[in-house]
Image: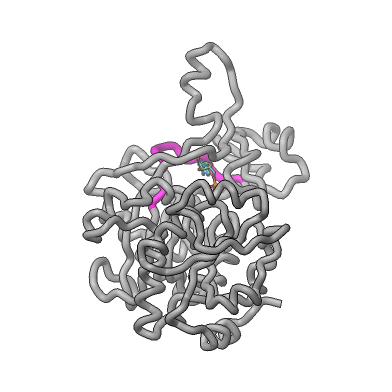
Amino acid sequence: MDVTKEKILEILSGYDKKKLKIATICSHTALQIFHGARLEGIKTIGICTPNRQKVYEAFPLGKPDDFLIVQDLRDIPEKELQDENAILIPHGSLVEYTGDKLGELKVPMLGNRESLKWEKDRMKMFKWLQAAGLQVPAVIDPDKIDRPCIVKLAGAKGGRGYKVVSTPEQFYEHFEGMNVIVQEYLIGVRAYPHYFYSPLSQDGFRALEGRVELIGIDRRFESNIDEAYRTEHAGLSFSPSFTVVGNELLVMRESLIEDLLEMGKSVVEAADRLFGGIPGPFCLETVVDENLQFYVFEVSARIVAGTNLYPLGSPYTVYQYSEPMSMGRRIAREIKIAAKQGKLSKLVF
Ligand code: AMP
């Protein structure tokens, strides 16, 4: 059964707030999270399989202070983490590995774990984005496909197995009987802005009781679509695929920053109305069309891998912080401030 917020706050009340640690699974954005915590003077715990430890040992400034070795990453050692006053940072791999068990974890976790349910169910996610007043791609019934559409497998992460189809026949040829969602294919430039919602800060770009910060923007490299021109120049025909392979930094026209901030604010405020808010990091996946209109096709209420691009700060944090500020460090900073002010209950569930 899912753990309640009351239970998490009870566990937290037993913590020694002067000895808080930050914990996560050694994967995804762990180097950045540990590195950022180190810069803020917070000790870290890396939940790790035996074969992975050497990978993290290779990065002395990014490795955790302590390893908690497990045979299976689906088994988060709750008791050990509680005993260490640990706050868990959910990232893509942690969400993926723990799956449905995430809601049951009896360890204080950064953010609102209700949000992870809303981002996981694509229909709910669209409801959230629409409640924020954002433009989203049309979701199309397979029998009514009348334009290029992208077909996404349920639960698929990182774009694997997605395909573009233009007719119901093409759809049924590949996806008959499968659990998928069909979305209108958006044409334009992809941009993935990363945000941090701080309920503790009363300045900057205000949202609810706090502020929303634009931390960075990335664009992804997906195989094979992002090198399609080479394939075409080589005279080969190919079927586009969307498997995420890496990320690159993106800086957008300065005149779009207002839209970016307003979108972040709307997402925070809609989350508050629908399920009690999203303290901490989140990201939107967007396409900007030729009229500079943003279309949002996904939201992640946690740190995303694109933030790994700027462990020493981004072209956006440089104007907000006088020291190098990564998303990992921003997380640690907020936890540190909340602990000092006795406001951790605003940050964790
Ligand atoms: P997702 O699993 O939603 O993050 O999608 C993986 C990748 O598929 C994205 O990074 C985009 O490149 C592409 N994609 C997803 N949805 C759309 C869409 N509606 N239109 C165009 N490309 C999309």
Q: Whole-percent x and y of residue 270? A: 43, 69
Q: Whole-percent x and y of residue 237? A: 58, 17
In depth, the one of 23 and 194 nearer the eye is 23
Residue 221 covered by magenta stretch = no
Q: Quadrant of residue 79?
A: bottom right
Identified at 33% across, 65% down, the residue is 212
> Which quadrant of the rendered structure holds the N terminus?
bottom right
**Is 100 placed above or below 347 here?**
above
Q: Is residue 292 left or right of residue 114?
A: left
In depth, the one of 237 and 334 nearer the eye is 334
Q: Residue furthest right?
A: 177
Q: Residue furthest top?
A: 235
Does residue 89 appear anywhere in the picture? no
Q: Quadrant of residue 282?
A: bottom left
Q: Quadrant of residue 142?
A: top right
In depth, the one of 75 and 288 nearer the eye is 75
Q: Whole-percent x and y of residue 280? A: 42, 67
| Total number of numbered discs in the rendering | 0
Q: Predominant secondary structure in magenta?
A: strand
Colouring: one colour
Identified at 39% across, 55% down, the residue is 194
Q: Is residue 12 left or right of residue 252?
A: right
In depth, the one of 239 and 316 nearer the eye is 316
Identified at 56% across, 52% down, the residue is 27
Q: Which residues are magenta?
A: 182-193
**Is 280 placed above or below 4 here?**
above
Identified at 67% across, 59% down, the residue is 73
Q: Is residue 83 left or right of residue 211?
A: right
Does residue 18 appear anywhere in the picture? yes
